[in-house]
Image (cartoon, grey):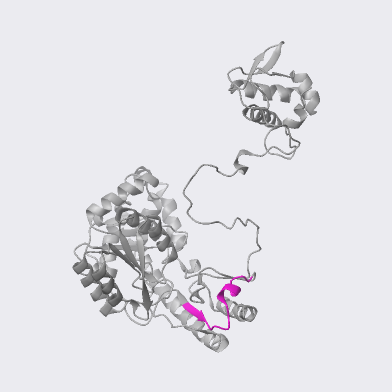
Amino acid sequence: MFPYEHIIQIEKESKVPVYRQIAISISTAVKNGTLKAGTHLPGSRELARILGVHRKTVIAGYEELDKQDWITVIPRKYVKVSENIPVLKPRKWSHAKTELPYENRFSRPFKMIEKTAGDDKVMSAPLIIINDGCPDVRLSPIDSLLRTYRSLTSRKHTIRNANTGTAQGTLKLREEMVRYLSVTRGLNISVANLLITHGAQMSIYLTAQLLLNAATTIIVGKPNYPVANKTFEETGARIIEVTVDEKGIDTDAIEKICKRRKIDAIYVIPHHHYPTTVTLSAERRVKLLELSKQFSFTIIEDDYDYDYHYTSSPYLPLASGNHHGNVIYIGSFSKMLDPALRIGFMVAPKNFIEQCTAFRKIIDVGGDGYMQNALATLIKEGELNRHLKKAKKCYHQRRDFLDALLKETLGRHLSYTLPTGGMAIWIKLIPDFSIKKLVRSTRLEITRWDEKENAFRFGFASMNEDELKQAVDLLKAELQRSRR
């Protein structure tokens, strides 16, 4: 007799009901060609005996298969595999456990985004995580934001309007942002010039998809925000790297390149460049705008870290200058409030925003209208400004505390230039120590590091003084292990 006890796998501990396990095993055997069309199956009483289950369980399994047209049931006569099943080549029966469909690798050609290590081991959490510069959520007005959010979900008119027309962002948030960006950044815009996105990264992606292709060239800093580089690479565009020094991206080098070849866009992070934290000088800002007019390239201005300056007032964005609509300005509320709050924005001419909105709708119909309107209320009532004022004072103190701590504890092992703002310090190790070895530590996790530069970003804003001291003490201990 056919060994049904081997093709019907029953796992008592499974959350899937036994009758469903029977149905799945039989349908899998049919799909694999092990059971051919027209094959008679054991009666419910006989199969129940073979499997050691109640007869009603087998009957329920057969009923499930009958509804799905896998089998034909003739009451009191026989049960057989449906005649309509295609004849498949039978596979050799094996004692091995049946492989679940999604345990197989996808075998058809598809686009590879990055190589994966395939290491799915569960690692224990490190004692300390040094992030690349995140706000301290404990300081953020999240409670107030969520109270407003809950309030909006209980009002009839806000429920009706919450998810209407959110592809470009709710009108309420865009209206508040027009005023907010005018006061804080000197941008003279209308609601038609704004697109609300799920973070700055979506804005970069949309911009890249509309601007770049295999026939275009974009200039980026060296080093640069790696996710932006990856986004540009995926368009097929040629990427040219230009050195970033203590004054920001080298505009003289950009000019020389523009004289030799056509440049379509330049990606620049003017405030607290990622990862080096340097700020683009006033002289280079002026020259970059002049080069943009002269050589007709677009400036993608990623101003993710505009709001935190400690030693002076910030430079106004390139987007606030006279650029004839040739600057696409990108910002984010994630760095102000919480990385989990995925609300970013893009400022550009109306026709470009329209096409970005249309493209965005292909992958994402719109944002969270309740959250966007709650954020609009936070801005309108001045709570965002009050938070930024408080957070800026706190982060300034933490930056100075970390600076003193590093000089006292690790001064001989590393070097850095103290940034004028932002939420991280770009730290370079001396040649005696290896950043690659340091990041292998199981007690310390560093989220952004660069092997070529032998450097890493030390995000200080999210840690209080006790946490900063603990991080530096552990860093000192781990550095001894990373000596070359």
Please indicate whether residue 96 sits to the left or right of residue 334 in the image.
right
- How many marks the image carries: the answer is 0
- Quarter of the image where one finds residue 381: bottom left
Residue 89 in percent (x, y) is at: 63, 27
Of residues 320 and 34, the one drawn nearer to the viewer in this rendering:
34
Residue 182 in percent (x, y) is at: 25, 66
Is residue 80 located in the magenta-colored stretch of the structure? no
Residue 43 in percent (x, y) is at: 74, 18
Placement of 366 over or under 473, stated as above or below: above
Residue 461 in percent (x, y) is at: 48, 73
Please indicate whether residue 29 sits to the left or right of residue 426 in the image.
right
Q: Which residue is drawn at 74% across and 39% down?
A: 96
Q: Quadrant of the N terminus?
A: top right
Of residues 163 and 50, the one drawn nearer to the viewer in this rendering:
50
- Quarter of the image where one finds residue 276: bottom left
Q: Quadrant of the C terminus?
A: bottom right
Q: Can residue 41 be seen in this view?
A: yes
Is residue 430 located in the magenta-colored stretch of the structure? yes
Of residues 217 and 437, the one drawn nearer to the viewer in this rendering:
217
Please indicate whether residue 351 sits to the left or right of residue 407 in the image.
left
* Magenta region, residue range: 426-441
Q: Which residue is drawn at 62% across and 78% down?
A: 482
Q: Is residue 186 visible?
A: no
Placement of 357 over or under 39, stated as above or below: below
Please indicate whether residue 211 sits to the left or right of residue 43 in the image.
left
Q: Residue at x 45, y 66 (%)?
A: 140
